[in-house]
Image (cartoon, coloured by chain):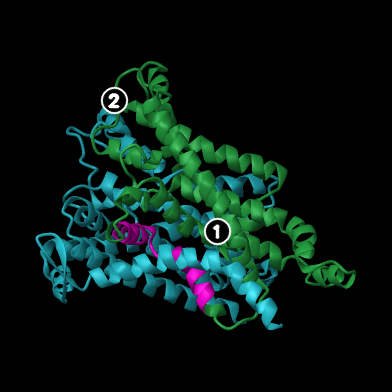
Amino acid sequence: MGTQAGFWRWAALAVPLGVLVFFFALPNALLLSASFLKSEAAVLTDELTLENYREVFESRLFRGAILRTFVVGVGVGLLDVALAFPLAYFLVRTTSRWKGVLIALSLAPLLASVIVRTYGWYVILNRNGVINESLMGFGWIETLLRLMPSTGAIIVGLAHALLPYAVLTLMSALNAINPNLERAAMSLGASRLRTFVHVVLPLSMPGLIGGFLLCFSIAISAYATPAILGGPATQTIATQIYVNMMTLLEWALGSALAVVLIVSSMAVLLLTSRVGAKKAAP
Amino acid sequence: MTNSHASGPWRALRWTVAGIYVFVFAPILITASVSFNESNRSLFPPRGFSLRWWDRAFSPEWLEPLLFSLQLASLTAAICVTLGTPLAFALTRWRFRGRMAVAALTLGPLMMPALVTGVGLLQLFQIAGARGSIGFPALLAGHVVISLPFAVRCVGISLQGMPHNVELAAMSLGARPWRVQWEIVLPLIKTGVIAGAVFAFVHSFTDVNLSIFLAAPGQIPVTVKIMGFLEFGFAPTLAAVSVITLVVPLIVVGIVQWFFGLGDFIYGDAR
């Protein structure tokens, strides 16, 4: 390529790259630097410090939020993989003429905002919600259950919101498995269950791990669901970032929490791409 | 294959899958039915039947944020495909120094939690003294950045599916480079561009995590408005508004799916 072609190419890229540098790289750099600045009475100073990180890792409140965030991430990842695996296996192997419709239906919830889907869980789980009303109606419980705010409610709500991601990951992993391998195992006398445990399950391991890590990494940074289905006693990193940034105006602390979130999420995604690379290798 | 599908384990799997579909759709259907409640609480099954919450959902109080979100998402989609198409070309076609850096910068917003980008943008606009830009301009910048990877990916997928030598053929027949791009390449990647615009639209329209940091009074996306109301109470109006915000992306995707088909791009996205 001549230098002239090279010039026009960079010219075509200048605007999109400029936008990304200015509105993505720069804000994140600012955030990173703010996390190392000393804050006095909610105003950032020029003084460098590690105090924010010390507070993030030493205060009971923040440590609790970090721990809960990881519990939520693991819970959501496990629940999603457990639900997505049978669904994805069915969708990949079914010979039904409704296959296309069923696949579309399983991904359709992605079109609804997390808010809409979390609202549904509120209606189900709140004090006078569907579960409490029906259990009382059947006379199975004497007093109303306190189902939310709770970590469990956050996990169920988020798992529901993120299920399509696990389904997509697992479907592409399962699609790569040659169905002849299953037929071969069965024609050699293995039962369907044995074929599943010894052939399908090991071959879909990369998809299972990939799906788990993807849901984990999205779950730990979710704000809306923990804010609605949780409460003051069930704070996560994301809700604490919001409180510190918007209510308390403690930007330094908020930024340090955000950096903790970035590092965790990046580490997990890096792990995901390693798993993906292994999958690609024969 | 068919006879093995009639076996016990397969039937058990079918029932499991039916149960999972119930889990997926129950909260959405329950929300929809709650909106017809006669009482002012979000009860299910709904008590009585009333359309008054729907009436309220179509009042200016809710229509304004809805229209705001529509404008924001449409503009975001248009900007994303405009900026995303050259990036997709660069990443799929061109070999140049700094390609890895461009790839990292383009796909970065997909890996970075949107919430963090929102916090960063809030700080940027405050520090730059552009406090007045918080609201629509800041939201637009944020939404473009977090939706751009979807546009780049879709255009990239259709570029990969296009035989490379059509361009060479056109050029060998004497077409100028810009004419090749405009008359040969662009029509061939049209579906990718449209799919990219749709995904960017949906991503922008449904976002909460970034928007909560950048909204300003009078310039609030509908999702943030719902979020704010959820903290105070749960009148059935919210259920009606939720259903409306669900229907908008459904209609957009439905129309585009009907005319162009999006299946390839959803799959491409998963990989």
The tint chain A carries is: cyan
Q: Is residue A132 visible?
A: yes
Image point 32% across, 54% down: which residue? B130
Which residues are drawn in magenta? B101-125
N-terminal-most mark, 1 or 2 = 2
Q: Amino acid at mark 1?
A: Phe
Please tell me whether mark 1 or mark 2 is closer to you in this view: 1
Image point 71% across, 54% down: which residue? B190
Query: SS of the residue at dot 2?
Result: loop
Point out the image quarter for the N terminus of chain A.
bottom right
B143 or A82: which is nearer to us? Answer: B143
A135 or A35: which is nearer to us? Answer: A35
Q: Quadrant of residue A47?
A: bottom left
Q: Is residue B261 above or below residue A213?
A: above
Give the number of marks: 2
Residue A166 screen position, x and y as percent: 48, 59
Q: Which residue is mark 2?
A: B41
Residue A280 screen position, x and y as percent: 59, 77
Chain coloured green here: B
Q: Which residue is mark 1?
A: B150
Q: Amino acid at mark 2?
A: Arg
